[in-house]
Amino acid sequence: LTGFRGGREVRPVPDGSCDLTAHVALDACAAGAGPGAVELTDQRTALGRLGVSGERPALALAASDPAAYVRALAAAGEAAELTARGGLGDFGWLLHRVG
């Protein structure tokens, strides 16, 4: 378990004062799951399935509703950061199907 505050590593304390990250072997988390119950993928793919996209909004929106365009542009920038190749988009995800 590792803690982060302000971009720096700190002592992990689960009191809300810092972000916590747990480093685990994803294949160990999948142990014992039945066939087809788990899937290893990357964050870019997982978020894409949830509809997260870093695509820029249509430029026509800037003319018709400038405030909405700026909000959509900011959201696209955040999504692009979360899905960037060579960056956060490469983080591994373990999907475990239930039900």
Image: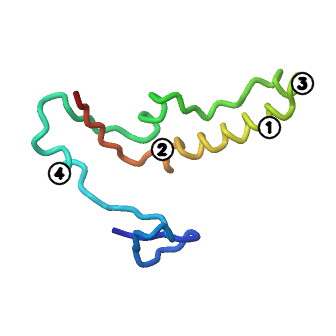
Using the image, tell me which numbered label, if any, was put on residue 28.
4
Residue lying at the far front in this picture: please name it: 15
Work out which quarter of the rendered image holds the C terminus and state it. Answer: top left
Q: Amino acid at mark 4?
A: Ala
- What is the distance, in whole Å, between disc 2 and disc 3 at their CAs? 32 Å
Disc 4 is placed on an element classified as helix
In this rendering, would 95 be left or right of 68?
A: left
Q: Amino acid at mark 1?
A: Val
Using the image, tell me which numbered label, if any, was put on residue 70.
1
- What is the distance, in whole Å, between disc 1 and disc 3 at their CAs? 11 Å
Q: Residue at x 48, y 67 (%)?
A: 16
Residue 7 picture location, percent across and down: 56, 69
Residue lying at the far right in this picture: please name it: 63
Q: Which residue is mark 2?
A: 89
Q: Which residue is mark 3?
A: 63
Please determine whether, in this image, residue 81 is positioned above or below residue 63: below
Residue 93 picture location, percent across and down: 35, 43
- What is the distance, in whole Å, between disc 2 and disc 4 at their CAs? 22 Å
Please determine whether, in this image, residue 15 is positioned above or below residue 99: below
- What is the distance, in whole Å, between disc 1 and disc 2 at their CAs? 23 Å
- What is the distance, in whole Å, between disc 4 and disc 3 at their CAs? 52 Å
Q: Amino acid at mark 3?
A: Ala
- CA neighbours of label 3 inside 10 A, class few (<14), some (14 to 19), many (20+): few
Q: Amino acid at mark 2?
A: Gly
